[in-house]
Amino acid sequence: CSCTPSNDNHDDKKPLTGIHPISIFGINDFHGAINENYKEAGIANIGTFIKQKTSQPNTLFIDQGDTWQGSFESNYNHGQIVQDVFAYANMNLRTLGNHDFDWNLDVLKEIQSRKYNGYSIPTLASNVYDFDWDTKQKGTTQQSELGQEYATFTVENGLKIGFVGVIDESCITSIATQLVKSISFSNSTEKAKEIQREDRTPPSKKERGEAR
């Protein structure tokens, strides 16, 4: 995608005026549906569609989680083929769903670190925090190794767009305990409002990953 993430201060540029159209496409609950059949488009068609859209100006494509787990073909390689195709297609950003934790945190990190031609899809984990299993206390450290707290993009017409990616607090109970003993999910609504309220400089390109 030709749009680029911004690391400028909010006050460095004058506010845009007038109408600045953008297109944001999204996919969710793909569940490793690699093969095309009577009810699923298959990864070849989905990947082609994403690449077509992300090649257009003022356009972003977002994956909203539950991406890899679900089919034999994807489960066999822990979603690597899905992640590679979506990176090839220049998926701009993704967030986590409960089933993205199904293979443990180390596998999750490994999948998310995969690159295609040097590009790794940035992931949001806005309300994922540490958790002390012994005391059963939620921590205050956002788990940046699992995903960024938020992300911003500046598209070709100059419009800056911000994203948060949260997972519902109750979803922690839908994941096998042994897989997520060291993390917790904070209140998703409150976290989104907190980020929205904060007036701060967007993180650098290095801090956000290689979004493009």
Image: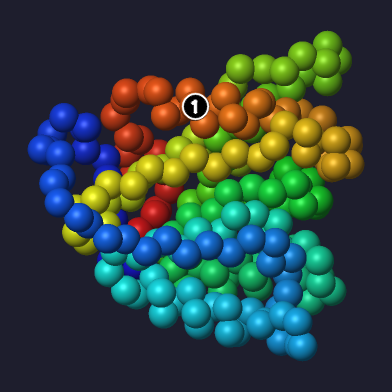
Spot occupied by residue 194 in the image (x, y as percentages of width and height): 48, 23
In the image, 110 versus 6, the foreground residue is 6
For the image, the number of numbered tags is: 1
Query: Residue 212 sits in which quadrant?
Result: bottom left
The residue most toward the front is: 18
Residue 101 is left or right of residue 64, and the answer is right
Q: Position of residue 65 (x, y in %)?
A: 65, 54
Residue located 42% across and 61% down the image: 24
Q: Residue at x 13, y 34 (%)?
A: 12
Q: In the image, is 22 to the left or to the right of 178?
A: left
On screen, residue 201 versus residue 107, left or right, reads left
What residue sits 57% from the left and 24% below the top? 190
Q: From the viewer's perspective, is residue 58 above or below residue 160?
A: below
Is residue 156 something one can see in this rendering?
Answer: yes
User: Secondary structure under badge 1?
Assistant: helix
Point 66% across, 40% down: residue? 167
Depicted 196 relative to depicted 166: above or below: above
Residue that badge 1 annotates: 193
